[in-house]
Image (cartoon, rainbow, N blue to C red):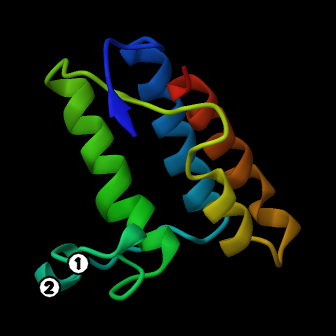
Amino acid sequence: MVYRENIASYEQVELALQSLQQEMHRSGHWSELGISVEALASEQPFCLDAMNFSQWLQFVFIPNMQALIDAKQILPSLTKGQGIEPMASEFYKNTTADQAVITVIRQLDDLLQD
């Protein structure tokens, strides 16, 4: 992942993040509980040693992306074919109700691609 001037507008990405939160709430993947400092300190991809993918989206991805938007920082730029959709598809593969979450993640990936 490289960082460069924004491909998508901050507003587009922020709306997609809001949609992701809504779909996670709707599908029961949004936790009302917090997460430990130790889990947040994980250095593994997607913090897989410390949390599940939904927790990573909620406690790492969404807050970090929102912080970049709020500070008007450069958003990550994905090469075509990169992104978090493959991980989302694997994690949410067992239920059709989760397809809306995958769809929003795919939209985010598309917004951030070169």
Q: Report which residue position mark 1 lands on.
A: 42
Q: Report which residue position mark 2 lands on.
A: 38
SS for tag 2? helix
Drawn side of residue 23 relative to residue 55, left or right = right
User: Cβ–Cβ below 8 Å for labels 1 and 2?
Assistant: yes
Q: Exactly how many numbered labels are in the figure?
A: 2
In the picture shown, does residue 10 fall above or below 32?
above
Measured from the top left, where is residue 37 in percent x and y? 12, 79
Drawn side of residue 29 relative to residue 65, left or right = right
Foreground mark, 1 or 2, reads 1
Measured from the top left, where is residue 33 in percent x and y? 31, 79
Q: Could you classify mark 2 by the number of other residues whose Cα lies within 10 Å: few (under 14), some (14-19), or many (20 or more)?
A: few
Q: Residue at x 58, y 36 (%)?
A: 109
Residue type at mark 2: give it: Glu
Q: 69 or 82: which is nearer to us? A: 82
Q: 14 or 76: which is nearer to us? A: 76
Residue type at mark 1: give it: Ser
**Where on the picture, by quarter, is residue 66?**
top left
Measured from the top left, where is residue 60 in percent x and y? 30, 59
Drawn side of residue 49 relative to residue 114, left or right = left
**Where on the picture, by quarter, is residue 110?**
top right
Image quadrant in which the N terminus is located: top left
